[in-house]
Amino acid sequence: MPAGTPRSFIVEADGGSRGNPGPAGYGAVVLDPATGETLAEAAEYLGTCTNNVAEYRGLIAGLRAAHALDPEARIRVRMDSKLVVEQMSGRWKIKHPDMRPLAAEARTIFPVGQVTYEWIPREKNKHADRLANEAMDAGKKGKQWEPGKSRAALSVVPDPEPLEEPLDEPKAAPSAGWSGDVGAPTTFVLLRHGETALTPEKRFSGSGGTDPELSEKGRWQAQRAADSLAARGTIQAVVSSPLARCRQTADTVAARLGLDVRIDEGLREADFGAWEGLTFAEVKDRYPAELDAWLASPKTAPPGGESFAAVARRVAVSRDKLLARYAAKTVLLVTHVTPVKTLVRLALGAPPESLFRMELSAAAFSAVAYYADGNASLRLLNDTSHLR
């Protein structure tokens, strides 16, 4: 290397959560770009947090490890998290309050312009992925990860364990039987948010994308939904996904009903990773093998995204918390396609593949009633009569 030429490092980082949120950890590795030699490794068990928080913590650890080697070095960060890469590159806004301080911390480690970001498929991020799993495995045993067990270069790193441990299917509510009167049910009225600019084009729009706001038509749909619910007069509480399109829909309804809005993180849409913003046809053209695998198994996630199994787990956790909080009440949940379909299929005891056999329109109502004996009953699905 000529005298005066800054050194260059590759930082690869990853993070994961077994449950999202759940037991989490990160892994990061600093590599020599010319030889692939491992220069530094870092990993840590984080306790309970989300995938995205763990990914950001992995990024911070990787940058700090590189800074310790040479604070003047040029850094190329490679991660399979499209969210982190796009946000740190400045192309996506950082709206989630948990992400902002982490991104700000990452930006303080090296001067602006000294770090570039690149998205890579998960299969090319095996080293960091393996370290993250080692950290989570250590945490499961009540320990922290210890360095030194593996310092092999990327070319000889063995295939890692899956980032998420296999998720058991969330408990479905028993099918409604012919039992006696068990009192008033807790009823969830499920409202999919109004349209955004992506909705008419049927583009993947999850929790890992640009967080679009309601379009003019979407705002009209939200107002129609609010008028319809006001006429019924049955809603006692409003709970929303944290994403903008749901919050705007929920705020419109809540203002009409004179209620406050409670935010529930578990109601956010699936993270579609590298597919965010693409149409199904575009995904099929660019990611044919990954799409086939995703359609074949609920435990398979889009590249850099979240599996339907992981979504089902967190939606079921939110369902149970909300049932406990709002026993015997009628509650409006403003959420997205995947959470609504998941709540419906769990109420019916239907298999995961039933998600692909339900139609759910923008601003449509569905409803599920939950009884004190554990039974559930689907009352409504995809009602758009208020939009006519």
Image: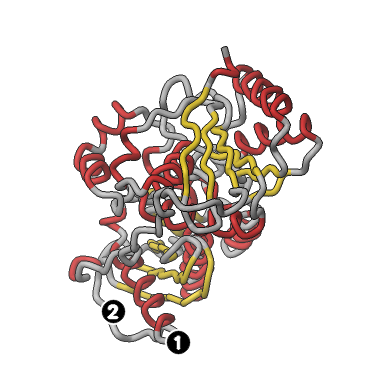
> Could you say where residue 91 lies in the image, as x and y percent from the top left?
53, 39
Disc 2 residue type (three-letter): Arg
User: Quick one: which residue is furthest to the top in this view?
Assistant: 388
- Amino acid beneath label 1: Gly
* Residue 166 sits in quarter: bottom left
Q: Nearer the viewer, residue 329 or 318?
A: 329
Residue visible at 39% across and 28% down?
359
Q: Quadrant of the C terminus?
A: top right
Residue drawn 51% across and 74% down?
A: 46
Q: In which quarter of the image is residue 168?
A: bottom left
Q: What crowding class fits label 2: few (fewer than 14 Cα within 10 Å), some (14-19), or many (20 or more)?
A: some
In the visual, does 118 lie left or right of 298?
A: right
Residue 77 versus residue 335 in the image, above or below: below
Task: Report helix, strand or loop for mark 2.
Answer: loop
State whether residue 367 appears in this view.
Answer: yes
Q: Which tag, 2 or 1, sits closer to the chain's start?
A: 1
| Residue linked to disc 2 | 151
Circle 1 residues within 10 Å: few <14, some 14–19, many ≥20: few
How is the structure coloured here?
secondary structure
Please name whichever residue, 219 or 229, is drawn nearer the observer in this view of the structure.
Answer: 229
Residue for point 46% across, 39% down: 378
Q: Can residue 116 be seen in this view?
A: no
Q: How far apart are marks 2 and 1 (CA)?
A: 23 Å
Q: Is residue 351 above or below residue 235?
A: below
Give the farthest residue toward the front.
Answer: 180
Local SS, label 1:
loop
Q: Name the residue under label 1.
A: 142
Instruction: Tell me where residue 28 appears, x and y as whole percent.
Output: 41, 69
Q: In this view, does 213 lie above or below 62?
A: above
Image coordinates of residue 145 in percent, x first then y, are: 41, 83
